Image (spheres, rainbow, N blue to C red):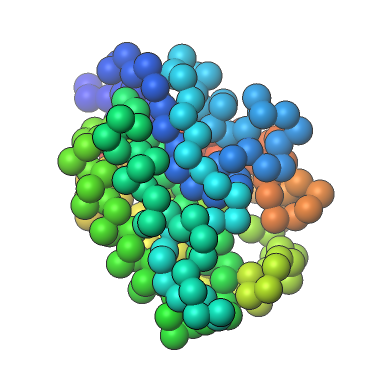
Amino acid sequence: MPITRFGDFCLGQGIRTLAVFGDSITVGEGATSPDRSWARLVAGRLGAELANAAISGTVLQGSLMADGRPRPGNGISRYRDALLGNARADALVVLYGYNDARYTAAPETFNLAAFVRDYRAILADLVPAYGDTLCLGSPPFIPTIGFAKGGPGFTNQSRLGFAAFATAVRALATEFHTFYAPVYETMATHPDGSLASPDITHPNDLGHAVIAEAVLAAERL
């Protein structure tokens, strides 16, 4: 029987390095210690050295925000330096879309279509480089109360609008035949707010553990 789970596949391949790419949740914010962050948990289960290329507050798309400029450190502007060439790891997990989904202040330029456009452009380079060891995760679930919390522009999203970003990541994983971790969908099965840290917008230790399990159990689409 072929191995269909990302964790089992990586163990079978004997990967030594794991790169992760995303925002503050991938940095590990909300966890009570770095070792309880989802990225550290996954790397530990795989016996791999972790190369964490996440930046807090970042978004994936390079679209213009309400101030007429792209958000600094966006994923499309930095993925080559962070993930390719000498920075290439044996396996990669991308967990982007959380902040893209939360930002609502410039809907004409910064939106779901632009997110998909830029994510697709990134994958056009990452898929040839990583092949079978690339996993895309849908953006982590945000509690309902979290839609009212955030910096300028990062409020007032709807549940439907946020969930559309999770659907888009799944569609991209299907299009590019990568592993897909249903992070949003898995977290959504827990009681609303039970996986959130006190700041509401980041997962607690249990939330990070749920994300890690969703990544390890990811299947190829």
Q: Residue at x 33, y 63 (%)?
A: 118
- Picture coordinates of residue 191 (x, y %)? 70, 51
Horizontal arrangement in the rendering, residue 199 relative to residue 25 (left or right): right
In the rendered image, which quarter contains the C terminus? Answer: top left
Horizontal arrangement in the rendering, residue 74 relative to residue 172 (left or right): right
Q: Residue at x 78, y 53 (%)?
A: 199
- Picture coordinates of residue 151 (x, y %)? 70, 68
Q: In which quarter of the image is residue 131?
A: top left
- Picture coordinates of residue 195 (x, y %)? 70, 45
Q: Which residue is drawn at 26% across and 59% down?
A: 121
Front residue of 70/157: it is 70
Q: Residue at x 32, y 25 (%)?
A: 90
Which residue of the protein is positioned furthest toward the left in this rendering?
A: 128
In the rendered image, which quarter contains the N terminus? Answer: top left
Horizontal arrangement in the rendering, residue 169 relative to residue 189 (left or right): left
Residue 122's place in the image compared with 9, above or below, is below
Front residue of 117/183: it is 117
Which residue of the protein is positioned furthest toward the right in this rendering?
A: 198
Q: Quadrant of residue 220?
A: top left
Report whether residue 5 is seen.
Answer: no
Report whether residue 140 is seen.
Answer: yes
Residue 27's place in the image compared with 138, above or below, is above
Horizontal arrangement in the rendering, residue 189 relative to residue 89 (left or right): right
- Picture coordinates of residue 44 (x, y %)? 53, 19
